[in-house]
Image (cartoon, rainbow, N blue to C red):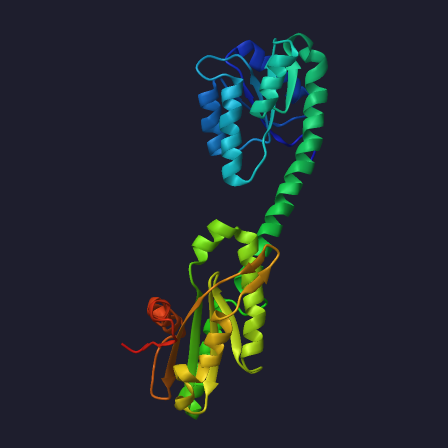
Amino acid sequence: MNSRDISILIVDDAKFSSAVVGRTLTTSGYTDVRHASSAAEALVKLEERNASLVIADWLMPEMDGLGLTRRIRQLDEQVNRYTYIILLTAKEGVNALQKAFDEGVDDFVNKSAMNDQLLPRVMAAERLLRIHNRALVENQRLIDTNSRLRKHTTLDPLTGFGNRQYAVKRLEDALKQARTRGGAACMLTMRIDGYQEMETRQGKNLVQQLVLTMSRRLKQLVRPMDILTRVTPDTFCLITHQPDIENCTPSSFRRLYDGLNHRAYKTAGGFLQASVSITICHIAEHGDIDADLMIHRAMRGLENSREFKRIIEQPVLT
């Protein structure tokens, strides 16, 4: 934004006053100056093309300067922009000015001192606008960068396990290996029972500590080459390729079920008891299923596991 080329909108129902403000600005080198005779007209013009600076009379019929300020702030929020607002007023007193500041007004020019105060206030607005809008642009760039990173990250930030995106990729690899080299892609789905109720009762922080402690226990219970992921806040997946499908049975993972269900978990609030429902499913070389769909279908048996208190062998080809 270069000096003297900012977009300015003057809003005043009094044509003489509007003309005086406009002439003051144009004779000082400002070239992008528009006029509106009411707040409603100003909003239409701002929808068509935004302004960097709005100079408005406080007292106008139908919608006054404060009402216009509220509407402009709503427009700004929608498009991540900041419009500097100066009100022209004859009002005096701290209470009136405090009310206007609370509504989002940036500055005031008293009509009795407009000839002396208007240009210095507009120049100050230019400097602040350059800083503020540069910060908005940089902040948006940061938001966009973080959004891209979130799309590409494959780690669960709490446990360090892979997230759902990672689970799908590694399950696809296991399925491909089963199709081309034989054996079976095997997956255990493990859900913490009553997770939402526990969060309500114990608080989010303590439940996250429980999840972290459980993830560390899981690492100790599985083989180093097995893949652990956290696909939802309350659900882990263990993904492995087994050379023999006979290894993909509930009895093969009984130790894991017992290790998760028969001990308490230490948190800053003391020891918490938690139970875990587990399903196991597998696809051999002749099976053909999408990895995402396999995870979805594996979760269907979790309620049965919770009811019968054992690992449920869940079919995924239906």
> Does residue 277 appear left or right of residue 218 in this picture?
left
Height in image: 247 above or below 53? below
248 or 261: nearer the viewer:
261
Height in image: 99 above or below 132? above
* Residue in the picture at 62% in, 16% down: 97
Quadrant of image for the N terminus: top right
48 or 92: nearer the viewer:
92
Give the image location of residue 22, x and y in percent: 60, 18
300 or 308: nearer the viewer:
308
* Residue in the picture at 49% in, 77% down: 256
Residue 101 makes an appearance in the image: yes
* Residue in the picture at 43% in, 53% down: 197
Give the image location of residue 313, x and y in percent: 35, 78
Height in image: 100 above or below 129? above
Q: Quadrant of residue 84?
A: top right
> Does residue 13 appear left or right of residue 287 in this picture?
right
* Residue in the picture at 60% in, 13% down: 96
Q: Quadrant of residue 193?
A: bottom left
Residue 153 makes an appearance in the image: no
Quadrant of image for the C terminus: bottom left
Give the image location of residue 50, x and y in percent: 53, 33
Give the image location of residue 7, x and y in percent: 59, 30
**How many marks do you count on the picture?**
0
